[in-house]
Amino acid sequence: MKSPPVPRTLRIVVVNIAPGGADEQTMQAQARRNTALRIGLLESGYDIVASLPADIFLPERIAQIQPDMIIIDSESDARDVLEHIVIATRDEPRPIVLFTDDQTPASMDAAIAAGVSAYIVAGLQAERVKPVLDVALARFKREQKLLDELTDTRRQLAERKLIERAKGVLMARNRMTEDEAYQKLRSMAMNKKLKLAEVAQRILDVEDLL
C-alpha cells in the first residue's frame, strides 16, 4: 500500500522594510516584529527560503528564488516596495501578504491594486501568522481561478468570431449555406488535425492575401 503523498512545504520569501531614520526604540520594535513573524512561520512548518531587503534588486532576486509566497513586513507605507513586487510577479503571480501598521485608506488601496492578497494591520503576532497565510493562499487561488476562467471565456469568444468570419468567406466564395460552410470547416480541421479556430484563421489569412 502506497503512503499518501507528503504535501510540499510552501517556500516563502520575507521582504523586510526598515523604517528610514529610525531611532533605537523603533529598531527594537522592528526586531520584535521580525522575530514574531519568523517564529510564526517556523511553528507553522513553512520554509523561509530568503529574507530580502526592499531595494531595486528585489525583482531579480525573487525571479531567481521562485518562491511560492511573498510576505512583506512594513511598519509604515510600503508603496515603493510594492512597485518592485509588481514587477517581480507580473508574469508569475504569487500570493502576497503585507503586515503593516499603516491604516491609511490610500495605502490599502495601493496594496490591493498591486495584487496584495492579504493586508494585515497591527496583526503581526506569531499565533496569527498561519491563519492569515491560509486565508491569503485560498483567496489567491480563487482569484487565479476566476482569472483563468475569464481568459478562457475570452479565448472561446475570439475563436467563435474567427469561425463565423471564416464561414462567411466560404459561403461567399463557394456559394455555400451556413451549415455547409461549417461542415467544410470541420472536415478541413479533421483532415489536418487542427482546431476549428486554427483552420478558420488560415482561411482568413489566405483571404487577406488575396
Image: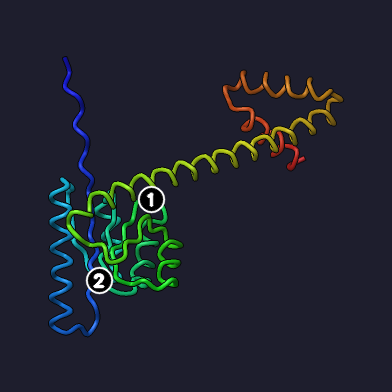
State the SS at label 2: strand
Image-quadrant location for residue 59: bottom left
Front-lying residue, 12 or 89 = 12
Residue topped by disc 2? 17
Residue topped by disc 1? 92
Q: Are marks 1 and 2 in contact (CB under 8 Å)?
A: no
Front-lying residue, 23 or 1 = 23
| Mark 2 Cα-neighbour bin, 10 Å: few <14, some 14–19, many ≥20 | many
Q: Amino acid at mark 1?
A: Glu
- What number is the disc on residue 188? none
Front-lying residue, 35 or 12 = 35
Judge left or right: residue 104 versus residue 62.
right
Q: Quadrant of the C terminus?
A: top right
Q: Nearer the viewer, mark 1 or mark 2?
A: 2
> Percent from the top left, x then y, of residue 90?
41, 56
Which residue lies at the image location 18% right of the left edge and 54% below the top edge?
127
Q: Earlier in the sequence, mark 1 or mark 2?
A: 2
State the SS at label 1: loop
Which residue lies at the image location 26% right of the left edge and 62% below the top edge?
123
Which residue lies at the image location 35% right of the left edge and 57% below the top edge?
118
103 in relation to 3, above or below: below
> Percent from the top left, x then y, of residue 140?
39, 48
44 in relation to 105, above or below: above
Which residue lies at the image location 49% right of the left edge and 45% below the top edge?
147
Judge left or right: residue 59 versus residue 164.
left
Q: Quadrant of the N terminus?
A: top left
Q: Amino acid at mark 2?
A: Ile
Q: In the orientation shown, which residue stands out farthest toward the top?
A: 1
